[in-house]
Image (cartoon, coloured by chain):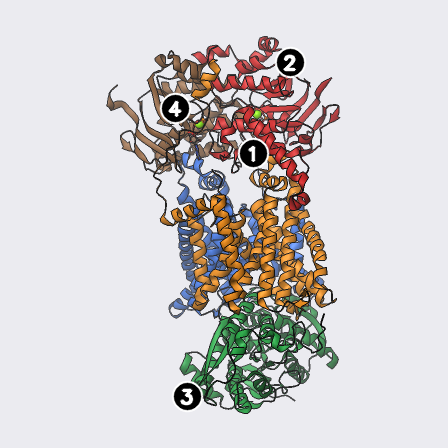
Chain colours: A blue, B orange, C brown, D green, E red
Amino acid sequence: MFSPGEIILQQTVNGLILGCFYALISLGYTMVYGIVRLLNFAHGDIYMVGAFVGFFVFGALAAITGTGWLSIILAMVAAMFLCGVLGFLIQRFAYRPLLDAPRLSLLITAIGVSLILQNAMMILTNGEFKFFNHSVNPRAGISLGNVTITWIQMVLLGITAVLLISLTWFVSKTIWGKAMRAISMDRPTCRLMGINVNTIIGITFFIGSALAAVAGVMACVYYGNVHYFMGYIMGMKAFTAAVIGGIGSIPGAMLGGLLLGLLEAGGTQVLGSSWKDVFAFGILIIMLIFKPTGLLGKTEVERM
Amino acid sequence: MENKNNLDLNNGEVAVVHEGTAKRGFFTRIIDSVYSFMDKTHNKIIVAVILLAFVLTVPLWADNYILQVAWNAMFYMLLALGCNIIVGFTGMVDLGFAAKFAVGAYTSGILVHTFGWNFWLTLPIVVIVGMIAAVLIGGPALRLRSDYLAIVTLGFGEIVRTVARNLEITGSASGLSGIKRPYIFGTQLTRIWMWYYLFVFLVFLFVVASNRVKDSRFGRGLAYVREDEDAARAMGVNVVKFKMWAFIVGTVMGAIAGAFYVMQMAAVSPNSFQFTQSSNILLAVVLGGMGKVPGVMAGAAFFSIFPEIFRSIGEYRMLFFGIALVLVMIFRPQGLWPERRRR
Amino acid sequence: MSESNVILKVDAIETYYGQICALRDVSFEVHDKQIVTLLGGNGAGKSTTLKTISNIEPCRVGKITFFGEDITTMPPHKIVELGLIHIPEGRRIFKDLTVRENLELGGFTRRGDDKKRDLMIDEVFCRFPRLRERHAQLGGTLSGGEQQMLAVGRGLMAEPKLLMLDEPSMGLAPLLVAEIASIIRDLNNEGIPILLVEQNSKMALGLADYGYVLETGEITLEGPASELIKDPKVVKAYLGIE
Amino acid sequence: DKEEEPPAPGVTTDAPDETDAPDETDAPEVPAGGVFTIGALLPMTGPEAYYGNDMYQSYQMAIDEINEAGGVLGYTFEIFNEDDACDAAQAATAGSKIISAEPDIVVGGYCSGATIPALQQFYDANLVVLVSAANSTNITDLALEQTFMVNSPGTHGVQTLTKLAKSLGVTKIATIHQGDDYTKNLSDIVERDMPGDGFEIVAVEVMEKGAADVSAIVTAIRNAGAELVYWCGYHADGSNVIKQLRQGGYEGEIVCGDGSSSVDLITGSGEAGEGVYVTSPPYVELAEGGTEYVAKYEELYGQPPGGYSTLCYDTIYVIKEAIEEAGSIEYEALRLAVENIDYPGMSGRIKFAENHELAESNFMIVKIENGEFVLVEVD
Amino acid sequence: MALMEVKELTMLFGGITAVDHLNFEVEEDSITALIGPNGAGKTATFNCLTGFYVPTSGEILYEGKSLVNVPPHKITDRGIIRTFQNVRLFNNLTVMENVMSGCHSISKKFVGSALLRTPSERREEAEIKRIAEEAMEYIGISDLRHEIAKSLPYGTQRRVEWARAIASKPKLLLLDEPAAGLNRQEKEDLVTLIRRFRNELGMTVFLIEHDMGMVMDVAEKIVVISFGTKIAEGTPKEVQDDPLVVEAYLGKDDDEEEAV
Ligand SMILES: Nc1ncnc2c1ncn2[C@@H]1O[C@H](COP(=O)(O)OP(=O)(O)OP(=O)(O)O)[C@@H](O)[C@H]1O
Ligand SMILES: Nc1ncnc2c1ncn2[C@@H]1O[C@H](COP(=O)(O)OP(=O)(O)OP(=O)(O)O)[C@@H](O)[C@H]1O
Ligand SMILES: [Mg+2]
Ligand SMILES: [Mg+2]
């Protein structure tokens, strides 16, 4: 049994960890949105593909480098690269031809890509669950009374923090980041500034997808299983998180992800898990009424 | 005098048009020529009559399965037409349309199943509940810009589903089943062909309603809102009110479709209202060509018939469907049958 | 004039919007140190010409060369890297970026040298003090004229080898119209050739060395500015009688 | 306005009126040597495709055996499947597609939520249905005269759980379900039936299918002081739940429902799975002749049989027995024969009670020990 | 009495004062111009008058009643219509549909009558079409009625905007830089048109413009603002000679400048 303080602390930890997953995935969402105004519904599935790539690479490496952190890191690097390439290719062949089309058409294409990834993976893996058995002790960590924070959780928190800081810096401070933001506003004019629009969009998809892969491999390690529809709920939640944080804003995506995770944990504790989504969505909707552009989103400027 | 002359010199008319030998894809050319054929009114009537005759005679030759698929297509047309008011006409992104049809389905289902009402008497209640739901969802959402609106509709979709799953009155997770089917002129509607005809009639009503909305001051107001909210405001359009009513009309249409759906299925469960359902409806609208009534219907038909045609390939089916979606969008970015505005 | 100092050569280009032909057999040249202006009524195809040169609109027939290099099908960002800068019609400010960020992007092709960039931004601020006051304001909230200044300033950031301006004086107060004119003259004095499109034909012909008249997508008249300014047709259509 | 008196809710009952024309021409004077067609409603795509496939293979195995042995009454069996993807709407289309193909009997049904809407249609079309896996009591609540549930219903599972819990000496129970018809039904039965036996239900939680994280649920369950957690869902998510329960510091008993009866539960949960109980449908390896069955199945399909394999296998043999009993494949005769069947199958005794559920529970309790299921006897 | 009175109008954006205690009047049936340097607050003033901005302080009276805190569409209902500095047409709609939007406040028909298509709805629809045709005829763009707005050249788009504005039969017409992007000839046509709006259609016209030649030509009264405050007011002649105006806005003789 917990003391009330411990319960709050433990649920906060639970929420933060879940929030980290949401945040990592919604980072990709928000980056892609931030440059082409596309709600990339296939993003959750890239996370799934990332998890599978991680799983297979890890399996292949297990014999050589063992089943510890080294293999995990190598698997993660491989997954990041391959998913980055996948994201780039998807962008190149499915989205680029549609950049000038109505935004909803692009959304539908994204749904199509999501179907393709999901079903292709289902066929490849026979629809089975795969289990990721590593040798890192999932329960080792720091304990405070009844509350435990494991090493894996700390690694996850660390990765999330590092990525947040470096991406925020990249997008707000470097000329590339500024170019990315400019592209979302006016592509032809960007071309007139000498910006290679297609390349930058491609890079953005690469980075966003690589981030999803990080989350995917971390999910393998943390939860220990992979399956072809694991991206569905994650994708939807991450999308929610991205919007809540103020879509297009990197720290916003992070904040939105953590907040959503915390709300779900809190909802589970307070109202029970069957009402947690009602609880989380309810609060988010109320929040949007008061802050219609998301937590850190900027009001779009509109001049007469 | 001089003025006149000068005016002729550069009166701002479109430059002389030289018909170019544009290189267009073969299919695009075929499709375009079909559309330009359809632009002439009497061709339109001929095609409509042939189509109608075809649609009405389907039950004469089709087996149970084909009728079920055809019925399903009609059902998706109803949903897509409702969604089209919100998405196509007004340009709001709705990711929770399934919630709207859930509202109608449960209202009618509960009244008939639990309280023993006559189905037809539940329809006015369905309309009222649909309006209330629209106001509840729309109230907070309509002041938001598109993507934020999308998340609110999505959120409400999930909320409606979760609530339905947790309440006793909605039959919780298993939903309601064994609902008594309604009678019409003393005959109980048990056979699929009866439902088919009923739904054809409903589609007809929805098409008429959509067209009337489109060609009215209300519908034009929606188009103005879709194109440019600020300019619309400047022209005297009460943007929030128009959006709200578009939302209400769309929701009520969805709710009515849901009420009939639940009667045909004789069962309803929260599983029918998952996010995929909402995205499917949106997909039908965009695939067909937002705002264009026949286009939206074509989209719904494509959406419900395509996967059936490929049913035999089993697990590859949805993969192909995904590929088809992407290809259609790449080659027809405006949808299968978009609005053509140039003369 | 000799071929040798031709900087930009547009050779019989045709441009289409869908099936509509907007430019037909348009040819002209911009020479070293020259200011060339395109005149023409509404919809004549002036903006389309500039867009075709910077390959924002593809050119279906014809050839465009810049410093002897064929740029007809070169991607726009490459063209900009060559120094052919186009300040587009209608300002096209990045509305959610600040004034300073807009300017930084103007110098995208010259990225890397931050000191130089800051110097150049300062130069723009000197020309348009108003922009300095508003350096942290979002581009979209600027007034129309302020945006126009920013658009011109942003173009200057790229250190053009040839500058194409599309209606730079639109929406500017008389004082600033004069400023634009002097900028154009200054740049030209520095040796930068200019291709100018202006509704304010009087100003344009006043600045230009050479002019072309475009009507419904075709060039109907050309000549040194000093002659055009006296041509009765031009006077009647573009200069008006005052 | 005719009011109907028979139990079937919501569907017309005057039989001649509702058989479609083709059904009538399809009169049952099929000569000996004809084909007896079985339509199977299964999830062949979607999250549950794995089970649908496994079930289909199990049917096929039994059918091949019977056909090799010369069929029954001169009929050879043939089976085809339609995909319901575990989705109500798709099940309706799949159902009508099955009906259009005019089979002689229908089997299948994995997801209760998808099975139920189709059952109405089969009833309308006068087709006997043997539901092999889905076991929500909502199916038998429909009280359709031609629908039979070959799997033990959730109530039997909960009776087994009650026995187990008593023998373990725990009183505080928590359940976790997945929000769908079958798993929620199971959890509901626990909530409804167990308090009567002196148990306290301290928490009822839900984990969405495919959701990764249940740590918040684990914390809530621990906080509620549960001594036994009953996982009502499927094995895939089940192994995740077990891991996270242990990872989150829960130290009480864990019992899984029949949806988790699969060796994959052992592989998936790894170390955390040690000591976990399953209230299982007849578990092949532990049944009589089980090893041969598994060997044969593995040889044929290159994978081990799933949790519902023997039920499906038995379903086909029940059909065979019923045809032999009825001496005909005509609807009413067949229906009656199935109703009165008493067949000792691989999965246990198949005999239907009044409400067309199995009269005798076929549930057993197994426990994971050293990475294997072992049978646990309690009384 | 003045049709519109602006009293102590102030509009702040964060630290920026766009309009600063501004006072002026627009007489009924007049053609009044608002001029001033770039960023002086002219468009911001328009936005306050049409309800797009809620002024920080001050009062706007139109026909004696306040316009502060009234939403834009209600202001349009009261007979005030505006055009935009950057043309704001409904890009993907046809010219006809664009112009019909001007008639929006004429009818009050809504969902019910749309669905039932009542006879009065049909009558009003016909009326709206007629008015729109008339407006297009008046501006001279009838031939373009089926063109899509965004494919028109800039100058033509401007004219569609005017047609849209006059279709609403406003009492007060606000034009924000109507001549920007037009050539000499078109400007002259515009001057004629503005006069006709006033003389034939009985509108009061209030415009912002930078083209001094045109302003001098058409305006009867000019209000000059700089940094949000009024620095001069009067007839074109008076204003033109005002040293403050010359210093802040005109510079030296602008004709000479252009002709260099
Ligand atoms: N995006 C477009 N789609 C279709 N037609 C277009 C498009 N842009 C321009 N046009 C057409 O091309 C012709 C030339 O337009 P362009 O903008 O080049 O004229 P312009 O000379 O710059 O006129 P302005 O002085 O009004 O800017 C016009 O007839 C116009 O209608
Ligand atoms: N939304 C806003 N946020 C911040 N500043 C604004 C906003 N709108 C206007 N401003 C500032 O207020 C001042 C007045 O702008 P306004 O648009 O009224 O100028 P203007 O007189 O119309 O100028 P121009 O002739 O250049 O169009 C400008 O300096 C502008 O930058
Ligand atoms: Mg132009
Ligand atoms: Mg202005």
| Amino acid at pointer 4 | Glu
Q: Are marks 1 and 4 on the same chain?
A: no
Earlier residue among tags 1 and 2? 1
**Disc 2 and disc 3: Cα gap in Å?**
107 Å
Give me the residue at 26% from left, 18% from top.
Answer: C1
Kindly identify which residue carries mark 3: D68
Kindly identify which residue carries mark 2: E233
Q: Ligand 1 is found in which quarter of the picture?
A: top left
Question: Helix, strand or loop at disc 2?
Answer: strand
Label 3 within 8 A of ligand 1 by Cβ: no
Question: Helix, strand or loop at disc 1?
Answer: helix
Numbered disc in front, either 2 or 3: 3
Numbered disc in front, either 1 or 2: 1
Q: Which mark is residue C215?
A: 4
Q: Residues within 10 Å of mark 3 (few under 14, many from 20)?
A: few
**Disc 3 and disc 4: Cα gap in Å?**
88 Å
| Amino acid at pointer 3 | Glu
Quadrant in the picture for residue B226: top right
Q: In x, y percent, where is residue C195? A: 37, 24
Q: In x, y percent, where is residue C39? A: 40, 21
